[in-house]
Image (spheres, rainbow, N blue to C red):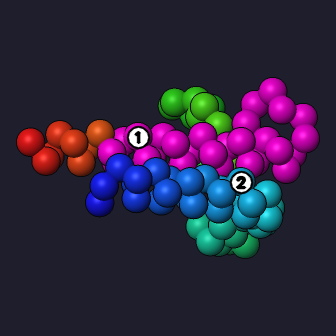
Amino acid sequence: MNKKEILISLGIALLVAIVLSPFASPHPDGLERVAEDKGFLEKGEGEPLVASPIPDYTFPGIHNEKVATAVAGVTGTLIVFGLGYGLAKVLKK
């Protein structure tokens, strides 16, 4: 892939993150749902070992929930892209 194709792909991924992330389900995911149904959800709750920079997929400090989720989606997309691109550069050499 050349740089133009990479930037177009990144742009599409960012567009998807911006448009679709506000529609993410507010309901628990599979593992959390099973823990809730079986009655042991509280055992997994408590003080985390490492604080999440974007807790619950909403960007801290933004009061509009849909905007906060979109910003979290964009941030996550950029982080994953940066790590993947950097790893590809290192492995290419």
Taking depth in this image into account, of 4 and 77 the one nearest to the observer is 4
Quadrant assignment for the N terminus = bottom left
Residue at (43, 47) in percent of width and height = 81
Give me the C-alpha separation between circle 2 and circle 1: 18 Å
Secondary structure beneath dot 1 equals: helix
- Residue 45: image x %, image y %? 66, 45
Q: Residue at (83%, 32%) from the top-left corner?
A: 62
Q: Are marks 2 and 1 in contact (CB under 8 Å)?
A: no
> Is 28 placed above or below 72 here?
below
Element carrying mark 2: helix
Check residue 39 in the rendering and tell me which mark sits there, or answer none. Answer: none
Q: Which residues are magenta?
A: 59-85
Residue placed most toward the observer, 41 or 67: 67
The answer to which of 83 and 4 lies nearer the viewer is 4
Placement of 50 over or under 28, stated as above or below: above
Position of residue 9 relative to residue 47, above or below, is below
The kind of residue on which mark 2 rests is Ile
Circle 1: residue type? Gly
Q: From the viewer's perspective, tell me whether residue 62 is left or right of residue 59.
A: right
Which residue is tagged 2?
18
Q: Is residue 85 left or right of residue 9?
A: left
Q: Main secondary structure of the magenta part?
A: helix
Q: Which mark is residue 82?
A: 1
